[in-house]
Amino acid sequence: MRLEWLEDILAVIETGSFIEAAKRRFLSQPAFSRRIRMIEAHVGAELFDRSKKPVQLKSGVSTHQASIRELVARLHELKADLKKQDQDGENQIIIASQHAITTSVAPSLIKNISAKNNLSTLLKSANRDECYALLMTKQVDLILIHHSNADESLDHQGFFQEYELSKERLIPVCLGSEHNAIKSHIIEGRLPVIAYPSDSYLGQVIEREVFFQLRAQLTIDRVAETSLTLAILPMTVAGVGVGWLPDSLVAADLASGLLTDLRDALPDCELSVMAIQLRDSESIFKSEVWETVAAYIDHR
């Protein structure tokens, strides 16, 4: 049983609501519901009586509530001790980065951290919800995520310290040799796309800021789906369809003519790249690394 799963269970117990528990755990509602189903599948039994409001543990599970709380507290103490010993010995900072940012902003920021602070960096690539979960459970020191102006702020209680590192645009691109064919499809009212899943963060952004506009004119044909930006790029290069990719990721392929920018016919969207840490972080590298983040912004 994972620590974050136990914390998910406690969040439902304490809020009496899957919706409020998802907010507390800094997860989207679909992602949190999937996690609860995964936990119940792992245990082999339903944990919650969903017929009651507020939601409650089933009677056979509620007797273990105190044990769950004690176990969570002990695991947190153990993790904190092990992490401090590891960092003291290895001079290491741990960063979780949203998949799409791992190859754009993350490398140059890590270079600055290494050069200025004499630190090694362990970089974990994850989806946006997972990055927040890793930060809240103090498994990482810093996260790098995308944020849209249309997003609801997840920092309801002032948990985080945030910096905007840069701006990126998700732009529509296709294989250069397929440009005329794609334009013909658009004229015919059909758009073949390599899409992000609708329950992923980038999928929700594209649905809200791009597909919502296009559906009045076009049929969106999802010829392929993946949550990995780095998987959409080779599929676009293979001519599978139109992909919405970070402008920094496709700059070289656009310059060479391998890919074609379709913004003359299709909308794009802007995202901020955010660096976020917990305000109460006890990392011994907190101030030094945060100063490096600020310096990165000043000189980008």
Image (cartoon, helix red, strand yellow):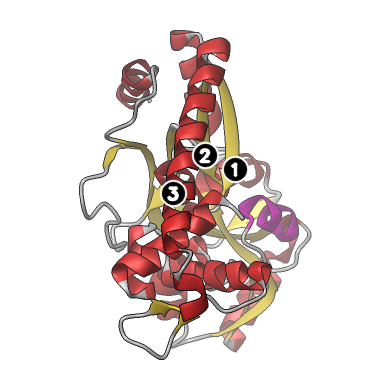
Q: Residue at x 39, y 18 (%)?
A: 285
Give the image location of residue 126, x and y in percent.
Answer: 57, 48
Residues tagged 2 and 1 counted as in contact (Cβ below 8 A): yes
Foreground of the two, 128 or 41: 41
Q: Residue at x 34, y 75 (%)?
A: 17
Residue type beneath disc 1: Ser
Position of the C terminus, as image quadrant, is top left
Q: Earlier in the sequence, mark 3 or mark 1?
A: 3
Position of the N terminus, as image quadrant, is bottom right
Counting every numbered tag in the picture gives 3
Evaluate whether residue 165 shows in this view: no
Q: Main secondary structure of the magenta part?
A: helix
Q: Is residue 26 left or right of residue 41?
A: left
Q: Earlier in the sequence, mark 2 or mark 1?
A: 2
* Vertical side of 260 occupied by 217: above or below: below
Provide the residue designation for mark 1: 125
* Vertical side of 112 occupied by 161: above or below: below
Point out which mark residue 96 bears: 2
Residue type beneath disc 3: Glu
Magenta residues span 228-236
* Vertical side of 167 occupied by 115: above or below: above
Q: Residues within 10 Å of mark 3 (few under 14, many from 20)?
A: few
Residues tagged 3 and 2 counted as in contact (Cβ below 8 A): no
Give the image location of residue 110, x and y in percent.
Answer: 52, 23
Give the image location of residue 56, x and y in percent.
Answer: 39, 78
Foreground of the two, 91 or 193: 91
Q: In front of the other: label 3 or label 2?
A: 3
Give the image location of residue 108, x and y in percent.
Answer: 51, 25
Provide the residue designation for mark 3: 70
Residue type beneath disc 2: Ala
